Each structure stands twice: as C-alpha cells, then as structure tokens.
Image (cartoon, rainbow, N blue to C red):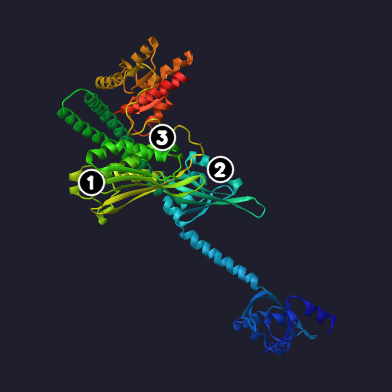
C-alpha cells in the first residue's frame, strides 16, 4: 500500500472511488467508510453505490447533475447501513478523467452528519413547539427589540388587550402601561437582573380601560451579552383581584360584625351586671338581718334564682369569648390538690341540702405545685360537679384527682367527677358536649339549664391542651373525666398553696388585725353605692362615697384613705381618667394609694386592661363579699408592710 493509500485510509471521514459509467461500482473504500456503512471491505468492492442509497432517486438526481458539472459539494444523502439503519451524510464528489480527458472515476468524500441533522431536527421541532405554545398560550406574550418597541406578540395578546396589529406593531412597550406603573418597572432594574417575575401591575386595553395583570419579563441578549430585546408574559388576574377584594370586604365585614358583637356583649354584660350587683348585694344584706323563717326562705329562693341568672350570663359570655378566641390560658403556679379541696369545701352546702354526700379523693403522688390556669381549671371542675349534683337525688357525688403518668418536669393528671344520678342513654353521649344540648326535652323541663356548661368545659379543657369524655350507665350514674398534662413547678412549696388567698368555700375574712380600714368608694350608681357601702360597713370599715372621678380626686387630696374602690363608667370623669391623674400626682409626692377596679366590665382582657392603666387589683360586679374583703386586706397589708 502506497503512502497515499495509507494516508487516505487513516482519515476520519469516509473516502471512496467508484467507476464512472452505467454501473457505478465501488473501486476502493477507506476504513472509516467501511465502519460507517458496517460492511466488510470485500463486500463493498464491486457493489453498486446506488445500493447503499436509502432513496435510489437521490442517486439518479446526483448522476444527472454530474453530467453537467465535474464536482458537487455538500450534497446531503441518506445512506443505508448494513445493520443499524440509515445514516445522514454530506457528500462531496469530484469526476476524475483518464489521460484522454474522458470521465473515468468518481472520487467521493462522505462525512457523517447524523448528529448535526438530529440537532437541526430538534431545532425545527422546538421552533414548531414554540410556535404552538406562542400561539396558544392563555397569556399575552410580547417581544420587543433593543429599543423597547413591540416586534412580535401572540394571538392572546390581541384578545386580552382587545388590540390589532396596527395597535401593537412597532409601538413602544411603555405605551401599554400607566406612567406610575412604568416608573415601577424602571425601579426594578430588569435589564441588570435579566429576569423578573411576579410583578403585579396594570396595562391599558385599547379603550384605555385598565386591566390587572401579573407580569414576567425576560431580557434577551446576544452572544456578547448585549441587550437585543425582551419577552414579556402578562397574565390576566382581574378576576383574582376581584375575588381578593370580595374576600377582603367579607373579612372586614366579618371583623366589623365580630367587633360589633363584642361591643354589644360588653355593653350587655355591663348593663346586666350592674343591676345584678344590686340584687345580689341587697339580698345578702337583707339575709343578714332579723326576719321570719318564711321571709328568709323566700329571699334564699330569690338569691338562688339571681345566682342562676348570673351563672347563665357568665356562661354566655364565656362561650362568646371562647368562640372569638379571646380567652387566654394562663400558666401560673397552682396546687391542683388545693383546687379540688377548696371546690369540695365550697360546694358541700349544695349536696347537704339535697341529702347526698359530696366526696373528694386526691392521690398522694399528685405534685404539690404545678403550672396552669387556676381560674379555668376551677371553672371546669365546678361545672362538672354542679352538673352531677343537679342530676343526682340519692347516693353521692365524688370528685377526684389521679396521676396517669409522671416525668421529671411534667405530670399527666386525670380529673374525674363520679355520681350515682340518673345517667345518660348511650345514644345521647356523643352529643352531650355540643352547644345547647341536653339529653331530651323532658330533662330540660325537669332540671332546667341551657346545656352550655359542658360545651364550655370542653372548649376550656381543649384550650388547656387536654381532652374530656364521659362514661355512663342509664339509671346508675355517670363519670366525667378530663386529662391535662401540666408542668411541675420547680419551687419548693412553702406556706402558700399556690391557689390564692381565697377559696370557694372561704367565709368572710376575720381577724386581720388591721383595725378600722378607711375606704373611698368612687361609684355613681346610687343602688350600687348602698350595696357596697353597707357590705363594707358591716365588716366594720369606714366608707366615704365619691360620685365621680373629680370628687374622688378632691377627697384624696383632703383626707387619707387606705384603699380606693374605683368604678369606671362615671359621669364628668371616668375611673380610668381619675386613676391616671392620681398616679401622675403620686409621682410628685412619692405616695401610693391602692386602687381596686370594681366594675361591671367583665369581658376577656378587662382585668389586664385595668391593671395596665395603674390599678392594683380588679373585682367584677356582682362581687363576692369574701373575695372583696380579702382583696382589700391583702392590699392594705402590703401597703403597711412596705
């Protein structure tokens, strides 16, 4: 093999020589072409070249062209491989003449362009796909040139903007936007960032009405990084904006309605509690006097009815606050065992009147001090016990507390109230904790009540992170259970129970050793003045009355008082305004008189509001005499010890 033959054979492109005549046959082929066509060299030598053409017509076309031209460059031809199908090639053909100048051979260079054709085909398909997407996307697409003029757009752009070709072609893209919106675009520095999406803006329609859109802009650059245009995609969000506006209006309306409801409840609470304070207070004062047995019995019935009415009012307010999410659960140091004991002590009188026994049991392993909400925990326990007492006519009601599990820092407690009452039918148990639900209409008529107590108890238990359920046999009794997991206090218990100074069953405080306490009562309601002053005077204390905030400030400037009971709603100057002035003056004198907010405002957050405004304590009307006495004693003791 000559050097030339070796060189040709080593080339990485296919090279061959064929005869020139009626039968165009392979005369020689290099190794690369043998590999490309997947034949043995011996098979190709003498084979007609037309036999490896995928389309014989293509060979005849080339042969015809060669009659008039001695060479052809880059003719694309599909060749058949022996095994693996077709192969895209680019042929360059030269006619070689004999010494007499007659055509003798064809020298052919064959280059594999399969990969190139695949890329080209992919590009064509991509262009076709892009056109389909461009034409059918349900969003307006605009293409601008380097000077930000519109040069292309899709059909949906015309539809959405209600424009035609003459409205869009070669128009500045800026003309689609209000001036203020276009200034927002400029501030986004889109050319520097390249792509910016999620732009909520507005565009003009042909009639100059505005359309809310969500825009995404992509900057187009050439190979050198020079900006040559941009593509903008605009999505119509007018319906979403309308829905958002409707939702916002609905939310505002709901908030306004809820606010109105809260204001109404607060107003009704105040207006109902004010006369209830007078009714209960006067009943208590009258019951302390000499009277016949019949009169005493009549007044006790009246007081019980008034207390039930107050309980109903409290239930309704608690329910509304729970539903509005306005009840906050405290986490302070408490003694669960003391809560059970004090509730038992306070409710014994109810069971003794019915001739049934009230029991309580607390396991020895219950921690002495834990963290929780004493008010809400006591409320749930009292609700469950009152419910059990109501439906039990003989036997007993037992309240108890057990440990289910215990860790170093927390304890799972089981509270239960068991009775030997009428029980609950199995098919009614599932509805028992629903609002306004009682076992049946006959039960409601016979025992009364609204069915709110258990529903409120369930909400409170769940807010404290627990669960509540009932087990019952009709005619044999029921057991109400609830489980709470509470943190264990790290403090070593001392003299205090963690439950506060006053238990439910505590009687009027006596033996305080403070002598005659002098009290300023700021209250404009004449009946409430009489109730509070007589109640405090029967305790042996002196009471001076101020009819409004101005009088309270004048009296404090003229005389000494151990404590002030301050109503809020007073004419001329409210209790809050008077407290602010008193505290401001005390900054100059360095003195401090304890002020107790005594008000019919008893909604969620009222206590915190009054304490934050400079008052030392808070008592809601109707007031509990024992709580009022003990609160006054505590504040006076603190003042004298400081």
Q: Name which of mark 3 and mark 2 comes first in the sequence.
A: 2
Closest to the observer: 75 or 341? Answer: 341
Q: Which mark lies nearer to you, 1 or 2? A: 1
Q: Nearer the viewer, mark 3 or mark 2?
A: 3
Q: Is residue 223 left or right of residue 316?
A: right
Identify residue for label 3: 499
Q: Residue at x 24, y 26 (%)?
A: 284
**What number is the disc on residue 394?**
1
For marks 1 and 3 on the same chain, the one whose residue lies earlier in the sequence? 1
Cα distance between the residues tagged 1 and 3? 32 Å
Q: Is residue 344 above or below residue 620?
A: below
> What secondary structure is found at the residue carrying circle 3?
loop
Q: Position of residue 278 (x, y in %)?
A: 24, 25
Q: Indicate whether 34 appears above or below 330.
A: below
How far is disc 3 from disc 2 in space, using C-alphas? 61 Å
Do we see residue 327 in this rendering? Answer: no
């Amino acid at each position: 093999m000559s050097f030339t033959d070796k060189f040709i054979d080593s080339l990485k492109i296919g090279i061959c020589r064929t005869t020139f005549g009626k039968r165009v046959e392979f005369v020689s082929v290099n190794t690369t072409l043998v590999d490309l066509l997947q034949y043995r060299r011996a098979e190709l030598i003498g084979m007609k070249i037309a036999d490896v053409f995928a389309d014989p017509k293509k060979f005849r076309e080339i042969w015809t062209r060669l009659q008039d031209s001695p060479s052809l460059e880059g003719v694309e031809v599909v060749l058949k491989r022996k095994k693996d199908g077709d192969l895209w090639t680019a042929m360059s053909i030269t006619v070689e003449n004999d010494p007499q100048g007659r055509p003798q051979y064809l020298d052919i260079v064959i280059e594999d362009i399969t990969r190139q054709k695949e890329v080209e085909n992919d590009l064509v398909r991509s262009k076709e796909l892009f056109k389909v997407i461009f034409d059918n996307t349900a969003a307006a697409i605009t293409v601008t040139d380097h000077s930000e003029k519109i040069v292309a757009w899709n059909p949906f752009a015309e539809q959405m903007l209600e424009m035609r070709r003459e409205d869009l072609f070669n128009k500045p893209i800026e003309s689609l936007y209000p001036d203020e919106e276009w200034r927002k675009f400029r501030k986004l520095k889109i050319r520097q960032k390249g792509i910016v999406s999620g732009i909520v803006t507005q565009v003009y329609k042909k009639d100059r009405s505005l359309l809310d859109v969500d825009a995404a802009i992509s900057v187009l650059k050439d190979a050198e990084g020079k900006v040559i245009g941009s593509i903008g995609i605009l999505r119509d969000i007018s319906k979403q904006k309308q829905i958002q506006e409707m939702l916002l209006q609905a939310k505002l309306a709901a908030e306004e309605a809820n606010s109105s409801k809260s204001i109404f409840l607060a107003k009704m609470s105040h207006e109902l509690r004010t006369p209830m304070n007078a009714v209960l207070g006067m009943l208590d004062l009258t019951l302390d006097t000499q009277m016949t047995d019949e009169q005493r019995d009549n007044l006790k019935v009246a007081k019980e009815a008034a207390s039930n009415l107050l309980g109903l009012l409290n239930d309704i307010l608690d329910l509304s606050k729970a539903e509005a999410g306005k009840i906050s659960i405290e986490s302070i140091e408490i003694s669960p065992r003391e809560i059970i004991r004090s509730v038992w002590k306070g409710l014994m009188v109810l069971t003794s009147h019915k001739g049934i026994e009230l029991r309580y049991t607390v396991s020895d392993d219950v921690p002495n001090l834990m963290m929780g909400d004493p008010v809400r925990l006591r409320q749930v326990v009292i609700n469950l016990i009152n419910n059990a007492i109501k439906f039990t006519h003989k036997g007993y009601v037992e309240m108890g507390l057990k440990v289910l599990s215990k860790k170093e820092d927390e304890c799972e407690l089981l509270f239960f109230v068991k009775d030997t009452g009428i029980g609950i039918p199995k098919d009614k148990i599932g509805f028992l904790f629903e609002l306004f639900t009682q076992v049946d209409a006959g039960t409601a008529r016979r025992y009364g009540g609204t069915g709110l107590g258990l529903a409120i108890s369930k909400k409170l238990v769940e807010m404290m992170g627990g669960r509540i359920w009932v087990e019952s046999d009709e005619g044999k009794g029921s057991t109400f259970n609830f489980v709470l997991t509470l943190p264990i206090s790290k403090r070593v218990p001392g003299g205090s129970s963690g439950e506060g100074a006053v238990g439910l069953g505590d009687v009027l405080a006596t033996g305080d050793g403070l002598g005659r306490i002098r009290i300023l009562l700021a209250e404009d309601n004449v009946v409430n003045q009489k109730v509070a002053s007589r109640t405090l005077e029967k305790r042996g204390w002196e009471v001076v009355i101020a009819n409004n905030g101005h009088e309270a400030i004048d009296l404090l400037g003229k005389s000494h008082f151990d404590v002030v009971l301050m109503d809020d709603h007073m004419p001329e100057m409210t209790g809050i305004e008077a407290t602010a002035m008193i505290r401001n003056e005390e900054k100059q004198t360095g003195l401090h008189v304890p002020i107790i907010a005594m008000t019919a405002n008893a909604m969620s957050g009222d206590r915190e509001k009054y304490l934050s405004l400079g008052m030392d304590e808070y008592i809601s009307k109707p007031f509990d005499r024992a709580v009022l006495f003990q609160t006054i004693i505590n504040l006076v003791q603190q003042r004298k010890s400081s």
